[in-house]
Amino acid sequence: MGWQRYDTTGGTFRLSDTGMNESDNSIVFPMGAGIAYRDRSGLVLDLRGTFRTNTDYGLVLESGTSASYVPMHSWEASAAAGYEF
């Protein structure tokens, strides 16, 4: 569990004009999985993925609504290959 803070910079944003707040705080619940493989010759392969579900988001309004915000969930995937000697 974690805390995430979003801040917009470079301008003044009014929710009524842009549909976007200047800042937002939310709670994040990260979940991840990964697998690594290493063989005797030294080859190393690594795959990882992370999903962060976000609660209490309030940064960007959904198009055409005045009370519903866009979910701020995020995900990440990575792959790596290497050689150990």
Image: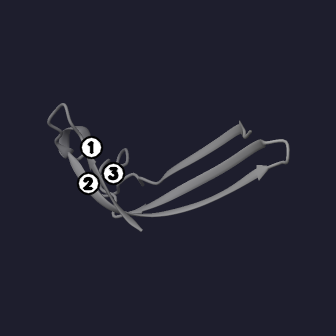
Q: In the image, which is nearer the foreground, mark 1 or mark 3?
A: 1
Residue at left offset 14%, top offset 36%: 12
**81 to the left or right of 63:** right
Crowd rating for badge 3 (residues with CA inside 10 Å; few <14, some 14–19, many 20+): few
In the image as oriented, which residue stretches furthest toward the bottom? 1
Of the numbered discs 1 and 2, the one sitting upstream in the chain is: 1
Q: Which residue is mark 2?
A: 24
Q: Which quarter of the figure has residue 63?
A: top left
Q: Which residue is mark 1?
A: 19
Cα distance, mark 1 to mark 2?
Answer: 13 Å
Q: Residue furthest front?
A: 85
Q: CA distance from mark 1 to mark 3?
A: 9 Å
Q: Residue at x 34, y 57 (%)?
A: 68
Q: Secondary structure at mark 3?
A: loop
56 sits to left or right of 14: right
State the image coordinates of residue 26 (x, y, percent, origin top left).
32, 61
The residue type indicated by label 3 comes to Thr
Q: Which mark is residue 65?
A: 3
The three-letter amino acid code for the residue at tag 1 is: Gly
Q: Label 2 neighbourhood size at 10 Å, few (<14), some (14-19), many (20+)?
A: some
User: Along the line of sight, which residue is nearer the eye, 70 or 41?
Assistant: 41
Position of the C terminus by quadrant: top right
Colour convention of the picture? one colour
Q: Position of residue 20 (x, y in %)?
A: 26, 44
Above or below, 13 against 60 in this view is above
